[in-house]
């Protein structure tokens, strides 16, 4: 059971927009800690997609966006492409656990 | 671009110590940043193990603190992970990373490719 809750799967057709939610609590996201997002293509290392809730590292397309409100955060992916098919993880800090924690991951399928 | 590469045994016996090294290229560890270890058991989610600053300051996952040591060797531009008294539950892909910290949280900015460590007799 992950501290941060993500839907197991989402799907969308090419060109569409999808959002992936990450729900926490008052000991992590709700306490004001930043949320980060990773993309992991099966068999490869995760790639940082969004850091500090809304920031994209150099090289990440602006089709990817992040937002945060209250105890939840969301990753938005617009203009879906076949190459976006991957697992997506959110991450934040938890004061109760005194550690950085991850969501369980969401598998994105591009139909 | 920063590159990281894990190395170490792929098989460790129960009760023994898991030892991995992360070699960093295209960036000098002593310049700054935290450097960390993250693991992912097969078919499961990610777990932050701990991190170290180039000066030696460490942060460990409280659930692993009693068994974990992370150290840094700036002369070799490497940092290492030792996990003692391992069990089958420690079987995972272990990845090293350069850690990027925002105002109140940290994330793994650059990752190694990861190495599978299996605990089995």
Image (cartoon, rainbow, N blue to C red):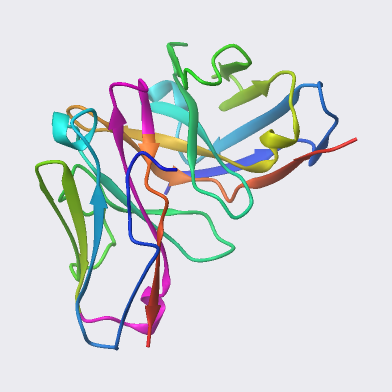
Q: Which residue lies furthest to the left in this view?
A: A69
Instruction: Indicate whether residue A14 is drawn in magenta.
Output: no
Q: In this view, does B87 lie above or below B11?
A: above
Residue A103 picture location, percent across and down: 37, 47
- Left or right of B49, for residue B7: right
Q: In this view, does A78 lie above or below B18?
A: below
**Residue drawn 61% across the image and 43% down it:** B5
Q: Nearer the viewer, residue A20 or A25?
A: A25
**Residue drawn 19% across the image and 42% down it:** A52
- Left or right of B72, for residue B119: right
Task: Give the magenta range.
Answer: A79-100
Q: Nearer the viewer, residue B9 or B43?
A: B43
Residue A34 picture location, percent across and down: 20, 37
Q: Quadrant of residue B68?
A: top right
Q: Nearer the viewer, residue A52 or B13?
A: B13
| Quarter containing the C terminus of chain B | top right
- Left or right of A104, for residue A63: left
Q: Is residue A53 above or below residue A11?
A: above
Total residue callouts: 0
Q: In this view, does B100 lie above or below A55?
A: above
Q: Which residue lies furthest to the front in this view?
A: A1
**Residue drawn 67% across the image and 21% down it:** B82
Q: In which quarter of the image is residue B118?
A: top right
Residue B86 picture location, percent across and down: 74, 25
Instruction: Indicate whether residue A99 is drawn in magenta.
Output: yes
**Residue drawn 24% across the image and 46% down it:** A51
Residue B30 picture location, percent across and down: 44, 21
Q: Which residue lies furthest to the right in this view?
A: B121
């Amino acid at each position: 059971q992950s501290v941060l809750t993500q839907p197991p799967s989402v799907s969308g057709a090419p060109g569409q927009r999808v959002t992936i939610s990450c729900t926490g609590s008052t000991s992590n996201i709700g306490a004001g800690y930043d949320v980060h997002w990773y993309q992991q293509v099966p068999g490869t290392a995760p790639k940082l997609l969004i850091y500090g809730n809304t920031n994209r590292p150099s090289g990440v397309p602006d089709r990817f966006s992040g937002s945060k409100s209250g105890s939840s955060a969301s990753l938005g992916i617009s203009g879906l492409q076949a190459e976006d098919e991957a697992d997506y993880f959110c991450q934040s800090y938890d004061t109760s656990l005194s550690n950085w924690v991850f969501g369980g991951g969401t598998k994105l399928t591009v139909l | 671009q920063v590159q990281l590469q894990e190395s170490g045994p792929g098989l460790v016996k129960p009760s023994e110590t898991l030892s991995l090294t992360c070699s960093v290229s295209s960036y000098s560890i002593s310049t700054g940043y935290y450097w960390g270890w993250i693991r992912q058991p097969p078919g499961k989610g990610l777990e932050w193990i701990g991190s170290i600053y180039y000066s030696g300051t460490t942060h460990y996952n409280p659930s692993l603190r009693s068994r974990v040591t992370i150290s840094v060797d700036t002369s070799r531009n490497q940092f290492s992970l030792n996990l003692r008294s391992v069990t089958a539950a420690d079987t995972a892909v272990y990845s090293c990373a350069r850690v990027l910290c925002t105002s109140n949280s940290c994330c793994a900015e650059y990752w190694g490719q990861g190495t599978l460590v299996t605990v089995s007799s």
